[in-house]
Amino acid sequence: MTTEAPDVVVVGARAAGAATAMLLAKAGLSVLVLDQDREGADTLSTHALLRGGVLQLHRWGLLSEVVAAGTPPIRETTFRYSDAELAIPIKPADGVDALYAPRRTVLDPILVGAARRAGAEVRFGPRLVGLARRGDAVTGVVVRDRKLGNRLVAARLVIGADGRRSTLARLVNAPVTHRARHTSSFVYGYFGDLPTSGYEWAYRPEGTAGFIPTNGGLTCVFAGHHPAVVGRGGPEVLRSVVSAASPGMGERLRAGRLASPVRAFTGQPGRLHRPWGPGWALVGDAGSWKDPISAHGLTDALRDAELLARAVTADLAEDGRNPWAYQSYERIRNHLSVPILRGSDEIAAMSWDDARIRELLVELNVAMNAELATIRTFTQPEFAVGSAV
Ligand SMILES: Cc1cc2nc3c(=O)[nH]c(=O)nc-3n(C[C@H](O)[C@H](O)[C@H](O)COP(=O)(O)OP(=O)(O)OC[C@H]3O[C@@H](n4cnc5c(N)ncnc54)[C@H](O)[C@@H]3O)c2cc1C
């Protein structure tokens, strides 16, 4: 039985889902967000935000909350290769003078709070298990709630922000348009007594590693390599791959104090789905998953939330008769994400030398500059979310 019918149901209440819901609710749509997880729960991620992601939080007035939560500012990024080290200061631009890497237990609740303040209803616990359809078009979701059982919620649009194993993408059989071939595995944990100069990345054919300063005076330390090297992870694998990637970082890590369990991610090759169809759309990892070595998933999610919200408001303002809005969303997303998918795929292959890894990082930097140029257009009135409503 249908008990409610918001304009939009968003499945997933983290970076992509909560941000999209916030923007749609601000544009005047009724939005229901459903997430199967517990409110405030952590998730697998080393959560480093790049400039585009920080800029989005700043534009939305949420960066001050990230800072108030004690997230340390990152004012320099150091790149280490086999034969050299390069420290690059974060230049102030667009009102942003530092990068941040808030824990997901900090970032996601800030976005959920913003979605609620904008008028979206956010519920934790219900799981998407099926869809209602009229012909080809999705007209609602079937959700399973431990207390209430299965319920149907009708909606003009269903958005899957349900992560890299998206149930919505599977249920609508969203075509895969771009595929990566390689995958790296990661192992990471949080360390005290490990001062850093900012983000510190290391790249050698023997391994990749990163130091990421975060909340609570801790540093998130990750190491990446082929799945066969990382195996099931653990503290010793973390220490040995960090040392292989950068002997100096390995030495500093041994002086640090492990302050958390060490988590492992076994890897999943990148892929882009076509992110829309009749009555449905995908945002964040659900439609665009890249190897985590890109450290770009969150930044993309916050960027694409705005691209999708713009398409949704343009389409619903014309009663669902504006597929061009979604075509534009897909085109811009692909323009920005395909170079990141390709670059991170080649890095994940771990078969580069010093010269090639430098080129790959320059290519990723070019992709990030294109992303920033796009985000800057969001401030122009004709591109604002809801300008077509
Ligand atoms: C090891 C690792 C390290 C990473 N490091 C970085 C990094 O340093 N920087 C960076 O930018 N990115 C990083 N990423 C990627 C980043 O974590 C993702 O891009 C980001 O989480 C995407 O956000 P999202 O909102 O799209 O999806 P998610 O964060 O995955 O959220 C999806 C939500 O959907 C919910 N959900 C799923 N299925 C259902 C269902 N059927 N019904 C209801 N709810 C459902 C889940 O409970 C979840 O809360 C990393 C990823 C991994 C695995």
Image: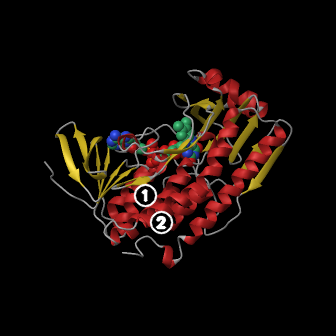
Against 249, is 23 above or below? below
Q: Nearer the viewer, residue 243 or 370?
A: 370
For the point 52% across and 67% down, the residue is: 59
Instruction: Please tell me whether mark 2 sits on a helix, a strand or a loop.
Output: loop
* Image position of 246 (left or right of 259): right
* Mark 1 lies on residue: 19
Callout 1 amino acid: Ala
| Visual colour scheme | secondary structure
One can see residue 165 in this view: yes
Q: Quadrant of residue 344?
A: top right
Q: Position of residue 130 (x, y in %)?
A: 27, 41
**Tag 2: Cα neighbours inside 10 Å, few (<14), some, or many (≥20)?**
some
* Image quarter (top left, top right, bottom left or bottom right) of the C terminus: bottom left
**Circles 1 and 2 in contact, beta carbons < 8 Å:** yes
Direction right: furthest residue: 83
Direction bottom: furthest residue: 381
For the point 54% across and 42% down, the residue is: 271
| Residue 60's disc number | 2
